[in-house]
Amino acid sequence: MADRTETEKRDLAKELAAAVRGEVSFAAADRALMTMDASNYRRVPRAVVAPRDAEDVAAALRVCREHGVPVVPRGGGTSIAGQATGVGVVLDFTRHMRRIVSLDPAARTAVVQPGVILDDLRAAAGTHGLTFGPDPSTHSRCTLGGMIGNNSCGSHSVAWGTTADSVRELELLTYGGERVRAGRGTDPTGAPTGLPARLRVGVKALVDGELALLRTGYPDLPRRISGYALDALLPEKGTDLARALTGSEGTLGVLTEATVRLVETPVARVLAVLAYPDESAAAEAAHTLLPHRPMTVEGMAADLVGDAAGLPKGGAWLFVEMGGASPGEAAARAQALCRAAAADGSTDHTVVTDPAGQRALWRIREDASGTATRLSDGSEAWPGWEDCAVPPDRLGPYLRDFRALLTQHGLRGTPYGHFGDGCIHIRIDFDLLTPPGIRRFRDFSYDLGELVVSYGGSLSGEHGDGQARAELLPKMYGPELVRVFEQFKSLWDPAAGLNPGMLVRPARLDENLRFEVLPARPVPVEFGYPHDNGDFSAAVRRCVGVAKCRNTTTGPGSTDVMCPSFRATGEERHSTRGRARLLHEMLAGEVITDGWQSPEVHDALDLCLSCKGCRSDCPVGVDMATYKAEFLHHHYEGRVRPAAHYSMGRLPQWLHAAAPLAPALNVLARTPLAAVAKRLGGIAAERPIPPLAAETFTRWWWRRRKTAAAPPPSGGRTVVLWPDTFTNHLSPEVGRAAVRVLEAAGLRPLLPPTAPLRQPGGAFPQPSLPRLHRPPLCCGLTYVSTGQLDRARTVMRRTVEVLSPLLQDGHPLVVLEPSCAAALRTDLPELLADDPRAAQLAQSVRTFAQALEELAPDWQPPRIDRPVAGQTHCHQHAVLGDAAERRLRERAGLTGRLSGGCCGLAGNFGFERGHYDVSVACAEDQLLPAVRESTEGTEILADGFSCRTQLSQLGDRPGRHLAEVLAEALGEPGELGELGDPGGAREQRVWGVPEGPGGSGVPDDPGGPGAPGEG
């Protein structure tokens, strides 16, 4: 039997490859990427085909039909009911069939292929003042084909309806190979137009025979998505076959082209945010706003919004967008709405006219599908009952009963969604890992189905039935209408080859759950995973598939970083979601069978820049940089590593050893020997080797401390200035500038020693003289990014030993290099989870701007009054935030925004052989265009050494650290930065201890004399 199965597989692969011009893959990695969508379900496909056009689709269907293999059409894979998963051949339309065939502004229509991203269509239509009305929160990555398959809606459905309201004509291929051109109207026989003979006769007979049932069996509400919309085939409804097929979830035909309606967008939009005491009050009020003709009526409660800024005081809010022919008209309509709402229960309101402010608030709503998967206590919550809908005027009482049902079953969730349409989204803390939890999931589903039907509602109000709800369709429609659904399916797909198990004759709603294949117990790992109770499987489970990481473009004013490698390659395996899926399958062991040794996972992670963007930009906080480090640690355990891991991964050691030879090495770096060194070190041939500092920052510091003419200001707060590897050896000018500014602000920066301190009995410990042979202090970043976690832990433990005594009195640790600050803030405590001092150290970390703002709040920086361009470091964006930096720039008169994204160099990544092209593509995504478009005289800011290096090597305008810009504006001190009056009394202090008897300004070193150590 096994031999026969393998033969059939080889035959299918051979015939598909011969028949289809697009990509055909039976590879484990490609199949693993398609096992899940954004639902709770998982199925393993046999193969993945990326058709180039409709002829490719027809060819793939023919081969699959001949082999009896089912076919699953798939768009962006953001479906929440499981309908984008299947066991046959997945047709991936996102690779090639993503063309806008035509756009007719006069007719307000567009012809699109199924893989067109919604935002791409909206951008094309926007040049004509038009848009596509339905706009689900996944608009930046969902496809038109997927929207048509699910009958998607979005926040503007109160104004523009569902996708079915926007579909004019569909071109499809049935599993049997028949071509259908579905539109509206009938042919001379009275059958729907565009059908081949067999279907024409069968569909007409079915509709004619069930007229009474089709007229009475459907609830009347705006968000009725469940089941087949066969009532659209009634003569009084225009016999609209295109509308009837919309929402059929790929079970009847494979879409190859669609003609859709476009709508005119208002000239101006204003967002009114109405506050209510609680979500029930907001739900009660939502339908009363509809007579004001709003464009949106979206509801959210405090347990989801958290401490978001810009909201009026309340326990729940309605986001109501009003349009107008001018900003004044839109604002006036919004104010009128607010007055009416105040008379009907709203406790407060705010009207947001600023587009940036509106985007910030809408982002909260759009990210909710992800953020709702983690409740306030960190516990997991899942889809499954994501989008039930009831008549809008019954939403208030329904929501109260819904909450009571959750309590009855001992469940929790955070409702939000399209209150104006009576549609509620929610993620619920189902236990889908154990048999009792799964039984509760099933029991709750049946009880909620009955509750929804009792209110005259729809089991699905947006995302379709798929496997999640189709089993319950008899509750909503009754057995007779469900029987008609089955007959309709049999007419179109008698072989049951299209998306079997979905919508009709479905699998049970508690089968094929994606969690059942994961290990029952936590696997041994190195990081602490504090937000996932130390469980790597739980960390990987964070990815629910909403695919925000698949954004191919960044919107106006966006500072998002995630996911630079996907934007560079466009391949699913290079998205955060794709990598999480591969890790999931690695843990499952069914498709990816080599565990930590998996080449599929390794290859996908190879182009992960470890930018940490997903840690903040992913709505559920997937941290792929950490997962990559974990994987590389296990993958290379006991094995020879790539050369770059030894050269770039152990960079602090090499730079420390090379410091005395810096001038000679810089000369050699400009000779042919550099090419040999790069080849041996696994470094890209295209990359110049950055020059080493002739004098390291720490040497400059100790020389300055010995010869300074006067002490720093005695009243200033002491800060520990971290001499990171990059500042110390490669850009000491940043360190010198930071010292200049910190001291000008009245602070006392002091460097840590390179060995643990002796305790002489004073309030502050005394250091011994650092010596050359001592290893440098290090945050461990380069070891972490290359997965050398044992070495990273050793380095970090030493850092904790040295720094902990210095930080016990609350002295902040100021870190100039954002990547090192992020490593100390997150990687260090997560690798040293057993050491409470690690958490203390992490909490002490401050960026340069944070230290100035917190410790010298009254200091006024020099006015520079120049525009800025450049990039916020990706690690700063993800881990530390840049609010203090923005405020400091504003106070200094540095105007404008820095771009988001990642520079592409990303520490060792851009230097490693094989990464150069992707590194450049990432730089070209946002950083380099922003710098090129800046005007003359613009200050180019880049606090990260990688960012500055990328600019110097790829651009024509270098960047500088903010500290350098401020120091320059302060005016240059003497060569060594002498302080005070040269003729004043000399009382040099280090860590609060008077200078030693040798007069060096450094206490005596019990280990003997030596050169200052390099940090």
Image: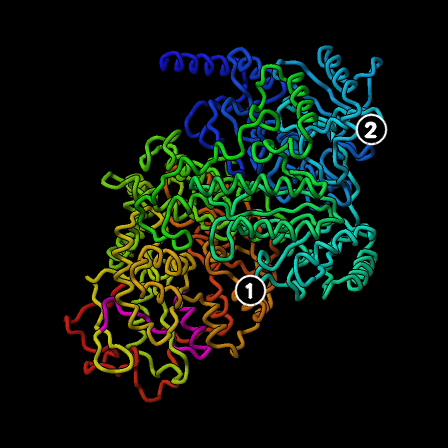
Q: Which residues are magenta?
A: 734-757
Q: Report the Cα–Cα distance between label 1 and label 2.
A: 57 Å
At x 75% / y 24%, what residue is drawn? 241
In the drawing, does residue 267 fall left or right of residue 731? Answer: right
In the drawing, does residue 187 fall left or right of residue 743? Answer: right
Q: Is residue 121 visible?
A: yes
Secondary structure state at the residue bearing disc 1: helix
Front residue of this view, candidates 956 and 220: 220
Q: Quadrant of the N terminus?
A: top left
909 part of magenta stretch: no
Q: Is residue 916 visible?
A: no
> Residue 786: x, y in percent?
33, 46
How busy is the neighbourhood of tag 1: few (under 14 within 10 Å), some, or many (20 plus)? some
> Residue 7: x, y in percent?
40, 12
Count of numbered tags = 2
User: What colouring style does the render use?
Assistant: rainbow
Q: Are marks 1 and 2 in contact (CB under 8 Å)?
A: no
At x 41% / y 63%, what residue is drawn? 816
Q: Is residue 32 above or below residue 898?
A: above
Residue behind mark 2: 237
At x 54% / y 74%, what residue is drawn? 862
- Of label 1 and label 2, which has the lower sequence position? 2
> Residue 485: x, y in percent?
67, 24
Residue behind mark 1: 886
> Residue 69: x, y in percent?
51, 17
How busy is the neighbourhood of tag 2: few (under 14 within 10 Å), some, or many (20 plus)? few
